[in-house]
Image (cartoon, helix red, strand yellow):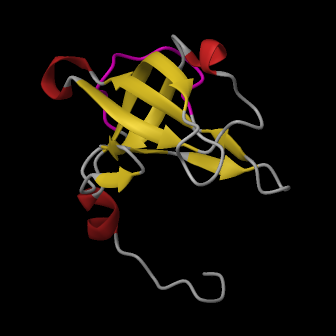
Amino acid sequence: MTGEGQGTASIEDFLRLDIRIGTVVQAEPFPEARKPAIRLWIDFGEELGTKKSSAQITAHYTPDALIGRQVLAVVNFPPRQIGPMRSEVLTLGVSDGTGEIVLMAPDQCVPNGSRLH
């Protein structure tokens, strides 16, 4: 059953998304963003390298606490300009019920660049 306003997706739609695991190697406040955000540099391994992302996650995370953390991100969306930064991947999270974002991550360490299946 889908929610109101949501269309039906096929497995082919899902497989077109390239969702990978990466490790945050650098993080800093992003005061130029319209909403409070953190700039992330995420290492996706040899094949993809390090990519930049802007994430509105300041309610639950500090830049220092993100270093070394593995996260999930869509790596095949076109880059977006966010203020002075070009965001190259979409870091994934879910709402905590109050509208603040909680990052999606594996419950065990996996190799950077591993694809979600």
In the picture, which quadrant includes the N terminus?
bottom right
Q: Viewer-proximal residue, 7 or 50? A: 50
Q: Main secondary structure of the magenta part?
A: loop
Residue 117 visible somewhere in the drawing = no
Relative to 53, say whether 109 is above or below.
above
Give the residue at x 70% y 27%. 61
Give the residue at x 51% y 10%. 68
Relative to 20, say whether 80 is above or below.
below
Give the residue at x 83% y 56%. 97
Relative to 15, say whether 102 is above or below.
above
In the picture, which quadrant includes the C terminus?
top left
The image quadrant that residue 30 belongs to is top right
Pinpoint residue 29: horizontal percent, then vertical percent.
58, 28
Give the residue at x 76% y 49%. 100
Does the magenta segment cover residue 28? no
Residue at the right extreme, as displayed = 98
Tell me if 12 is positioned left or right of 1 in this view: left
Pinpoint residue 75: horizontal percent, then vertical percent.
29, 44
Q: Viewer-proximal residue, 25 or 8? A: 25
The image quadrant that residue 111 belongs to is top left
Pinpoint residue 64: horizontal percent, then vertical percent.
62, 12
Q: Viewer-proximal residue, 104 or 90? A: 90
Pinpoint residue 3: horizontal percent, then vertical percent.
65, 82
Magenta span? 105-115
Residue at the left extreme, as displayed = 47
Does the magenta segment cover residue 111? yes
Q: How many numbered circles does the render carry?
A: 0
Residue 53 visible somewhere in the drawing = yes
